[in-house]
Amino acid sequence: MLKLVNRRGAAVDEEFLEYGPFFVAVLDLLGQRRAIARLEGFSTKDIEDQSIGFMNALELTFGAVLGVRELFSEMTDVILSYEQKFRMLSPAERAEVQRLVKPDIRLQAFADTFVLHFSLAEGESLPVAAVRSVLLMCCETMLISTSLGHPLRAGLQAGYGAKLSDSELYGPVSFRAHTLESKCAKYPRILVGDDLVAYLEREKKRNETPGLRMNLRRLMAEESLALFSIDDDGKHIVDYLGSSYKQMIAPKVPDEEIKDAWSFARRELARYQQQRDEELIPKYEYMVSYFRSRAQVWPDLIVENA
């Protein structure tokens, strides 16, 4: 039996500790730390000059961080309409679908880093539907934030953890998601852990009583897997410009965001090449290459000379 104690050696009441399988997404808003790091250390001298420098850096970074926070806060309650897929269902069946796909996603923010998590334990709703919702959120957030000049890097993973509070998750799944984002992703992309892929594969093939729940589970798993692609290094990524994403969000295509994100990626690559910035050139070479590889999906938006 699991026995937990606090730092004083007192036993922790397991009844109030939720542990088991979880989904975790760690997202980092790139470029913010560089801007903040330009500020000198605190000194009691020249306080006014330091304050001006801090406010200038804050103007460049705070808006982006706050914008992403607000975007995720709004989107955690948004699920794309299922009317097209289930328009033949009765009102009672439609209500059941809405109940099954309602996500219970928790968001925690640390400066320019955002952590989303939720339990994968089976309950009234389907956790796999929440996975699909977060994947779509990641796609949209990547495009919107990049179009505004702030690309993301992310790591998504499934595994075991324990909720220490409503918003705080502890355990190997959190560590592994963070490692994917901070150590493995390297470029502005959304990296997917192997265990998350395996979880979705199991959900797609899971045996249960035939009916709405089984059909919805398989659909959510299949559509989640369809949002992945294999990158050049053999790792799974969320394909935020892929044909599957385009089909799922139709007809609400983010035209301006894609065009602006494409322009930003090329502009930043040219800027860092001129500056000979060996740290950032590969990141934007990757992003420009990725956009070019999806030009056939968005021929009117990803235009070379636009």
Image (cartoon, rainbow, N blue to C red):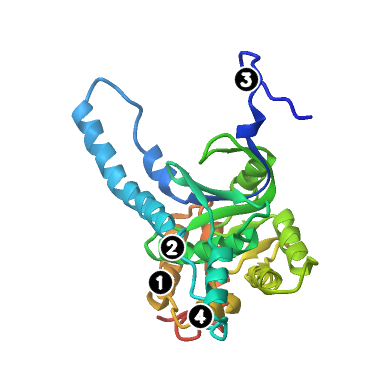
Q: Earlier in the sequence, mark 2 or mark 1?
A: 2
Q: Earlier in the sequence, mark 4 or mark 2?
A: 4
Residue density around tag 2, few if under 14, some if 14–19, many if 20 or more, within 10 Å: many
Residue type marked 2:
Thr
Q: In terms of secondary structure, where does tag 2 sit?
A: helix
- Residue 109 position, x and y percent, is 45, 43
Quadrant location, the N terminus: top right
Quadrant location, the C terminus: bottom left
- Residue 34 position, x and y percent, is 42, 44
Asked whether the viewer can see residue 32, the reply is yes
The residue that mark 4 highlights is 83
Residue density around tag 4, few if under 14, some if 14–19, many if 20 or more, within 10 Å: few
| Quadrant assignment, res 275 | bottom left
Left or right: where does residue 92 sit relative to residue 109? right
**Which residue corresponds to the image point at 29% horizontal and 22% vertical from the top-left?**
43
Numbered-mark total? 4
Q: In terms of secondary structure, where does tag 3 sit?
A: loop
The residue that mark 3 highlights is 6
CA gap, disc 4 and disc 2? 30 Å
User: Pointer 3 and pointer 1: residues touching (CB < 8 Å)?
Assistant: no
User: Pointer 3 and pointer 4: residues touching (CB < 8 Å)?
Assistant: no
Q: Nearer the viewer, mark 2 or mark 3?
A: 3
Q: In terms of secondary structure, where does tag 4 sit?
A: loop
**Which residue corresponds to the image point at 32% horizontal and 25% vertical from the top-left?**
42
Residue density around tag 1, few if under 14, some if 14–19, many if 20 or more, within 10 Å: some
User: Pointer 2 and pointer 1: residues touching (CB < 8 Å)?
Assistant: yes
CA gap, disc 3 and disc 1? 48 Å
Q: Earlier in the sequence, mark 4 or mark 1?
A: 4
The residue that mark 2 highlights is 146
